[in-house]
Amino acid sequence: NQGQVMALDNDERKLCRLNQEMNRLGIDIVNTLAYDLEKPDVPNGFLQGFDRILVDAPCSGLGVIRRNPDIRWKDSRKNLARFKKKQLKFISHAARMLKPGGILVYAVCSLEPEETEEVVLGFLKNQTGFKIINEASDSLFDREPFMDKNGFFRAVPHVHQTDGFFAACLKRLK
């Protein structure tokens, strides 16, 4: 219960549930704000200067097919291009809120290239001053089995006996 956490979501019900859980746990460092990260306009000085940002982006959810097999019948696969476009907006808009030297983690519960490395590499192509990092000095667990040669975190169901997850850690250089 140290520091300060700002939780953004465009769904006020999710924020209400988060506030209830934080109250139940006695955590008072979390502030919530209903905000649509798809909108590029951030009022001057507002939501800026963050040390760390986690973008848990909306995605197809195809990484959880192991425990939710019915997802294969949804339109998730057909919407990968739509998800990718939204994810690029989210990561680009969130990056503006990060202070120099800050860390942005982009995460999705998908292993589809359109939602994973294509989003990160597309972001890096259009944004200067960011790089992929793999600093595990303060990690609570051994991440090495999950890291690929590009520095991306991938939890793969048939290898790690987990759901499928992807994350990339990006550092703002300037």
Image (cartoon, rainbow, N blue to C red):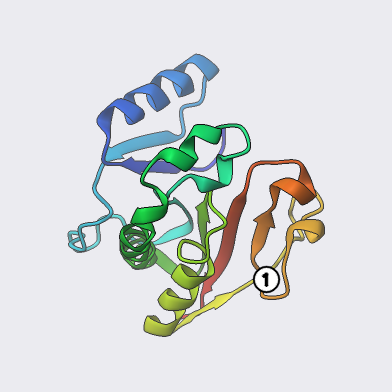
Residue at far front of view: 73
Residue 151 shown left or right of residue 116 in the figure: right
Residue 100 shows up from this direction: no
Going by the numbered disc 1, the residue's amino acid type is Gly
What's the residue at 30%, 55% (across, down)?
A: 47
In the depicted view, which residue is nearer to us: 39 or 21?
39
Question: From the viewer's perspective, is residue 53 above or below residue 34?
Answer: below
Viewer can see residue 72: yes
Q: Quadrant of the C terminus?
A: bottom left
Report which residue position mark 1 lands on. 151
User: Mark 1 falls on what kind of element?
Assistant: loop
Q: Residue at x 24, y 45 (%)?
A: 35
Occupied quadrant, residue 99: bottom left
In the image, farthest residue toward the top: 24
* Near-viewer residue (134 or 68): 68
Vertical comparison of 146 with 133: above or below? above
